[in-house]
DNA sequence: ATGAGCACATACATCGGATGTATTGTGCGC
DNA sequence: GCGCACAATACATCCGATGTATGTGCTCAT
């Protein structure tokens, strides 16, 4: 195995074993390189790779630190990976979202706070009856993010965040081609919110399913 | 932004835009470095980072190539990330798996081929009535992988693969501490397979839910 | 005594070049 | 025609030097 890969494994092991805790600072490049028995250049490759997937955080002039290792942070890298997929596989991502989003929405029905419900409501109100396509897409993303966050599962939240990114483009196209998409989306959002207020998990799940499925169906018909 | 990060973005852009297709070979290090306007050392950091998440495949003495970019390949990196999570967040991963696995199993009910059913059956038979814990865990992993593959969604398949990794450890502990876990797992596997043979999606979903939930419940009680 | 600035030490960023090593393809000899 | 040796290619690794951002502590004016 290449020395750089060895270094990646060793650093990973140090973190997993607890020798390096989240927030800890690594020895400086030259020292760590000597410690692991390789050159600074090779070590830098290892550190850069771990930095790309948010395991390490390097700050010039300061040092290199272990990140918080929050699921949210680590799964952020997922969206980077998802970006590489072409439109034909986006359908598969959307199918996964169709499974997760309704489940998350149903979970949120029993856990969401009054305060969060009001925030979501205010957000929908702020959008107005006839928003621009960009505002709608941004609002849609934020609306669902707010609900999923209320599910109480940060892994689920991050996963859906990562999956929603690439479908955003699809949503934009949809907004541009289907005139009634705007009003339909707004209506579906209201319905989901109402179900959440009623603590009706099944209704919330169903509306979320309908919501995602409508995007999926449209996308499938155009490819 | 650092030159290395720029290089990562540029290479990513080349791939996403289609200038570099899956399987294509990149210009050699020195040329690409000159093209992107940075040193070979810095370029290598970028390449190494993209290599870690399976975007690029470097072969010494040959060249650097774009991988197939299969969802399976790219999401493989997910398990690397998941490895960093501690046991308390494993519960959240398991909760996500509890959502996805039943859905995938239900999808498989209507798509799985006779041949695949027989293969799963043969696999269960080969395990015998009283397998070792290691064999059981390995068989369990393979059993579910086979089913999820039959769902026809490769993204879903890879995602579950990534999520199943960290829960494997949990399963091992379970096998070591709960004596009836072995027979219960075998029984549940038989039930899932029977439901698939009957093309009964709802039964398959329910058994899969029970199967994952039993692991989840046990894990929750021990933490 | 306190706060604003400045200078220095530190640590990462980037570079150029030199050398090692694995792979591939080619040409020679049998 | 087959196989082996060698050369060309491309990545692997290292070293040393210089640039740049950051944090810290000291000085000086208020």
Image (cartoon, coloured by chain):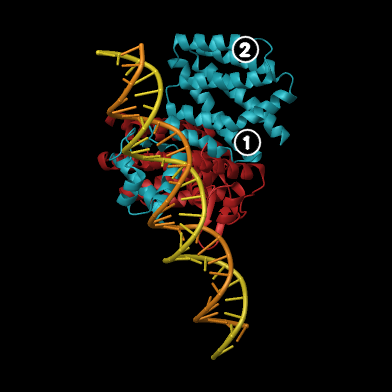
Chain colours: A cyan, B red, C yellow, D orange
- Viewer-proximal residue among B19 and A117: B19
Residue B209 seen in the current view: no
Quarter of the image holding residue C2? top left
The CA distance from mark 2 to mark 1 is: 28 Å
Q: Give the letter of the chain under mark 1.
A: A
**Which residue: 36% across, 54% down?**
A38
- Viewer-proximal residue among D2 and D22: D22
Mark 2 = which residue? A127
Q: Nearer the viewer, mark 2 or mark 1?
A: 2
> 10 Å neighbourhood of mark 2: few (<14), some, or many (≥20)?
some
Is residue A103 rendered to the left or right of residue B84?
right
- Viewer-proximal residue among A183 and B191: A183
Vertical order, A198 against B41 (above or below): above
Element assignment for label 1: helix
> 10 Å neighbourhood of mark 1: few (<14), some, or many (≥20)?
many
Residue A39: x and y in percent read 38, 53
Total marks drawn?
A: 2
Which numbered disc covers residue A70? none
Is residue B53 rendered to the left or right of residue B27?
left
Residue A132: x and y in percent read 68, 17
**Which residue: 40% across, 42% down?**
B165
Residue A53: x and y in percent read 46, 39
Residue B203 seen in the current view: yes
Q: Are marks 2 and 1 on the same chain?
A: yes
- Viewer-proximal residue among B28 and B94: B28
Element assignment for label 2: helix
Is residue A222 rendered to the left or right of residue A33?
right
Residue B181: x and y in percent read 31, 39
Mark 1 = which residue? A91
Work out which quarter of the rendered image holds the C terminus of chain B and state it: top left
Q: Earlier in the sequence, mark 2 or mark 1?
A: 1
Q: Are marks 2 and 1 in contact (CB under 8 Å)?
A: no
């Amino acid at each position: 195995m290449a020395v750089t890969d060895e270094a990646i494994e060793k650093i990973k092991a140090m973190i997993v074993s607890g020798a390096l805790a989240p927030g800890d600072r690594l020895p400086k490049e030259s020292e760590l390189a000597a410690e692991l028995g390789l050159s600074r250049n090779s070590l830098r490759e290892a550190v850069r790779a771990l930095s790309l997937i948010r395991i390490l955080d390097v700050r010039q002039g300061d040092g290199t630190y272990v990140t918080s290792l929050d699921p949210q942070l680590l799964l952020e890298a997922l969206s980077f990976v998802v970006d590489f997929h072409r439109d034909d596989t986006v359908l598969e991502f959307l199918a996964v979202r169709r499974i997760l989003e309704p489940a998350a929405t149903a979970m949120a029905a029993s856990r969401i706070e009054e305060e969060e419900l009001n925030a979501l409501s205010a957000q929908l109100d702020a959008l107005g009856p006839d928003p621009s396509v960009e505002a709608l897409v941004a609002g849609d993303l934020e609306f669902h993010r707010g609900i999923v966050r209320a599910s109480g599962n940060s892994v689920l939240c991050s996963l859906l965040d990562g999956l929603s990114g690439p479908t955003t483009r699809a949503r934009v196209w949809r907004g541009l081609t289907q005139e009634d998409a705007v009003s339909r989306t707004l209506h579906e959002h209201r319905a989901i919110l109402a179900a959440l207020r009623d603590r009706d998990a099944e209704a919330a799940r169903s509306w979320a399913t309908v919501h995602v499925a409508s995007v999926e169906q449209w996308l499938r018909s155009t490819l």
